[in-house]
Image (spheres, helix red, strand yellow):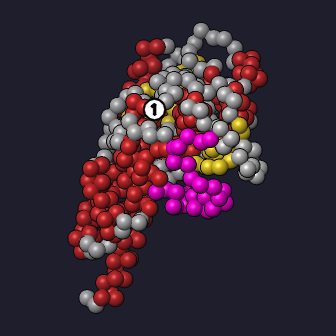
Amino acid sequence: MELNEREALKIKIGKELKLKTEEMATRQEMLELLKEFDDYILEYPEELSGYGNRSVVLEALGLYQLALNDLNVVTHMSPNLHRGWLNKALIMLRLGRLGEGWQYYEWRRGMAIDNNDFPQKTAEIGLPYWSGEKTAENQKLFVYAEQGMGDNIQFFRFILEAKKKGEHLSVLNKVELDTLLRYNLEKNGIEIFENGAKLTNDIKYFAFSMSLPYCMKIDSLEKIPYTSRYLDIPPQFEEKWKKKLRATKKKKIGIFWTSDSEHKKSRFRNVSFEKIRKLFSLDAKFHCLQKNVSEEDRQAGEKVKNLYFWDTELEDFSDTAALISQMDLVITVDTSVAHLAGALGKPTWIMLSYHPDFRWLLDREDSPWYDSVRLFRQDEDYQWDNVIEKIKNELREII
């Protein structure tokens, strides 16, 4: 085969395999795809993307050390490839190796991830990046909340910790969380950076919010601060939802089964209404915490006598927080509501995919991030049936 033919075939097969990686949904598909990648790398050992994409399949199969081995090849072949280091970071963090994980996670700052163009935002801000040093009395650190709303909530604890350690902060949060987090910033005497405002002369450094654990040397799980409740709810919202939900002898359970997020892992995170409805046979009142409910789920849910929808009244994230505060328990998939409930100290059961997001670690039912959280994990078959059955049995014990 001529060189140009070989190169063209390598590119063609590589693209096809990458597409399969993005669409794989079952363990059998993953195992078949792994074999295809093995053959591809055997034929094209010089092709960087083969190792990187195979590592994605290996991670999905729970073979994290093998995935790391592939990523080590990637970073050796291309030492300045940001994606290779970022993917290594996510595995390290998932394994609880925070020191290495946060260090490698800083490579994201040279990338555009989803709607977060870190180099562009860094250039726009135009300040030196904070490295954890104590700022002077007349200097402020600008903290910019990055990525999703769950990230903003989870990493808000490090803003509180920085304030506790004497840093002078100016914080820009996600617009959707402004009311809730503004209340908590004001309560803790932390300056709010208004969206669209200009930097003032006393702001000398900045950091993206998910850099804070690296800058603050949170290099072990034991060093994670604020693992119990660290968010409070604006009183007017709490009072509003106390009036809406009358006292009842039956347990009130907040439920969140599917997100309309375009996150690439949503297909693994979400639970169908058909499966989650098995819980509604229990003698409790279930309150849907979703702001967005599909028409299909609504029609099916309206036939369930003990399921209540509130989506049309959840106008602000503070409404969601206040609704959660009225629950005895929250059961949710991995979404921002899981972080919100944990940050409010509410007993929370999170349903997790076999290959979970890095923050939930592996092989444990508790979370070092939230004392009130319990984790219910899929088996390696990527099915929800065992998770739902386990939760149903646990619920029987408390209702």
Placement of 119 over or under 301, stated as above or below: below
Place of residue 150 in the rendered image (x, y in percent of width and height, measured from the top left): 56, 40
Task: Name the element at disc 1.
Answer: loop
Q: Is residue 110 left or right of residue 197?
A: left
Number of residues whose C-alpha sits closer than 10 Å to that of mark 1, classed few (under 14), some (14–19) or many (20 or more): some
Furthest residue in direction bottom, as rendered: 2
Q: Which residue has dot 1 on it?
A: 224
Placement of 131 over or under 275, stated as above or below: below
The front one of 24 and 344 is 344
Residue range in magenta is 107-136
At a point 65% along the width and 38% down the height, the residue shown is 137
The front one of 197 and 45 is 197
Q: Is residue 347 left or right of residue 1?
A: right
Say which quarter of the image contains residue 388: top left
Q: Is residue 57 left or right of residue 276?
A: left
Q: Is residue 154 visible?
A: yes
At a point 63% along the width and 44% down the height, the residue shown is 141
Which quadrant of the rendered structure holds the N terminus? bottom left
Place of residue 106 in the rendered image (x, y in percent of width and height, measured from the top left): 47, 53
The front one of 278 and 32 is 32
Residue type at mark 1: give it. Ile
Furthest residue in direction top, as rendered: 249
Q: Is residue 3 left or right of residue 144?
A: left
Place of residue 74 in the rendered image (x, y in percent of width and height, measured from the top left): 33, 64
The front one of 165 and 145 is 165
